[in-house]
Image (cartoon, rainbow, N blue to C red):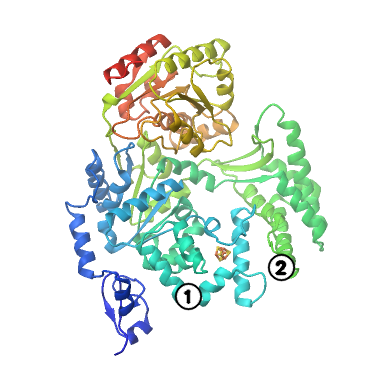
Amino acid sequence: MPEAYACRRCGETYSLDQYEDDRFCRECGTYLMPERKIAKLGVKIGKAMVRKSRRARSKDKWLPDGYELRKGQVEFISEASQALEDGRIFLGSAPCGIGKSLASLIAVLPKLEKGKLLITFRTRSQLYIYLKELRALNLGFSAISFFSKKSMCPLQVKGSFSYVDFSEECRRLKENCSSFTKPYCKFYWKTLRKKWDAEELALDCASKILSPIESVRVMRRQGFCAHEALKAVLNKAEIFLGTYHYLFNPRIREVMLQSLRTDLSSVYVIIDEAHNLPTFSRELLSSQLTQGTVERALSETRRFRCKTSSLVKECLGVLENQVFERAQHILKSERLKRVRPEELGDHFISQTNFSGIEVGDILQNYGEYVKQKRNELGHENLLSYTHKIGEFLGDFFSKVENKYIHLIRRDWEGNVLLEIRSFDGREITDPVLQQARGSILMSGSLSPLKVYRDLVLYDQDDANLKEFASPFPSDNRLILAATDVSSQYGKRTDEMLAKWKTYIEAISAASKGNVATFFTSYDMMQRTLRLVEIDRDIIIEQRNTERNTVVRQLKKSVNNALFGVMGGKLSEGIDYPNNLLTCVTAVGLPYATWNVYEKALIDYCDIQFPHNGESYAYLTPAILRLVQACGRVHRSPTDKGVIIILDKRITHPNVKQQLPSNYQKELQIIQTPNEAARKMRLFWKKHGQTL
Ligand code: SF4
């Protein structure tokens, strides 16, 4: 009997000839297996089964077993589905608890017969939520998820390489596999040699909806590179999950779409944590150069000599002297200064006779020579710092429109950086969102929605906006705003610090359970903390504090007081489950530090969004940081707690209207620490907890 082959997912069968012609199922793209092997594995298959399951779920029984319908979830599904039907971009501001990840999947999955789905996120924790929901839905879709190639690499070639350097190294190790030269990548070599086995295993990972780390573990055990094998079968999966880079970085997107064998017009996208998108896209268009890179490039010129090495040295010397040495004097009291590209260009002309752009080219050409030499000498590492600087200078002298600013800055470790920063990420986000077959952008804090829409799209008419109410009972929340305090510059006097101290102590005494206090900066936190006396175990956020350690510590007792900063790692992207925090106090409004960059950003936004520059560039990011911090209390419908904002500016109509609608409705004004404590005691008494 000739061997028969079957698809273990939809049950389609094929003859040996058909199998040899194409080893993937013509119906659903799954890798084919001998029928006897499927029987041996005891895998239940059947096209009818898969389709029936999808049909049944896509109507009324879509909720996976063990899930409960949540307030707002159905509304989210219908609003998002309608927007996709109408070919419009959907922006949803959906607070914690709506179940928006599942809702967004339900909105898109029924449409996948005509396309693929790309789910993108900023932080890895979001990936696990989607994987969990996809597995729970159990609709027979296969999903491939990626972290960066570097973090999925089973070889220890990571070291302190930057991502770009790692990619180059990986490319070289792969190239060496084909030319049989050392060093080579043994995982890639086996993935090539046992292609079918590697791809079959990768498809298995996809059908089981494994996380990147789980796939790496499975594939590494067989000696395969998970990243390469998963990439090779990407076109067989319906769903792809990865960080923003996969969608918004043009180079990475192109490679990903090639692997998917499709283009954006066939791809639905879900963009989670979309409040990050304006900043992410601006950063993608920005770049920076450190003094350390210039020093490493100078040592390259000593090591790799050629006709142009002394000219290259001269050019690098201009950077060293005119930028980094001078910065030591310029940046004495300030951390940030604007620089004019023409000024640096003039220095290059007067000292080397070449323009800035020409210097960029000279450095890149020399960098190519360095890479070639390193290769000839059998170096493990092929990167060239001079090449990097050449690329940076190319950008520095060509990105001169008003949407860019050139800066010299000292970071918190004292390093000096030369930077080009973009004010406008729409040239990255708009084309992607317009070209995709359908886009859902969502977050717990996209408030005000129209600001986020305008920061990612050129045309306001292309999007449907929807703010969803918090599904958690308002009775479980007390939101207070103090009008006798402010973190406004000029008001941060000793008297104000003393008032904050009194508030923090009164709030602590009137609180039931762990409390958190978030400040506008580390400096304000330290200065206030010196005065505070409370009878609780104190946890203070440091730059190297780990989130898990803090959560573990909070779980040990209900008598902790956590102190951190808004916009920091303990006030955003961290879950405090099971009412781990019962009170968050925001000390002040977390506006960005006022400097030449912020001023220029406001001016630019004022031109793009007339009369709204300050609101778009300065107020909205501050409100985001504030709401993120305050949102740490209520993580489930049963969580109860108090949110206190210690800044009278939050009650000003133009500021208050930027808050999510439930904050606007529920905000109660207080004028003294005693009043705060009294209201808090009443709140806890109402919930049957006296202090
Ligand atoms: S091919 Fe895979 S295993 Fe080899 S270096 Fe690149 S990422 Fe690492």
Which quadrant of the figure shows ligand 1?
A: bottom right
Horizontal side of 583 relative to 380 (left or right) equals: left
Above or below, 677 against 604 in this view is: above
User: Residue at coordinates 40% horizontally, 50% vertically from top-left?
Assistant: 128
Circle nearer the viewer, 2 or 1? 1
| SS class, disc 2 | helix
User: Residue at coordinates 37% horizontally, 80% vertically from top-left?
Assistant: 22
In the drawing, what numbered circle is on residue 375? 2
Q: Give the residue at mark 1.
A: 195
Horizontal side of 440 relative to 543 (left or right) equals: left
In the drawing, what numbered circle is on residue 419? none
User: Residue at coordinates 43% horizontally, 71% vertically from top-left?
Assistant: 199
Q: Position of residue 455 (x, y in %)?
A: 43, 41
Q: Nearer the viewer, residue 662 or 195?
A: 195
Q: Position of residue 256 (x, y in %)?
A: 46, 62
Mark 1 is on which residue type? Answer: Lys
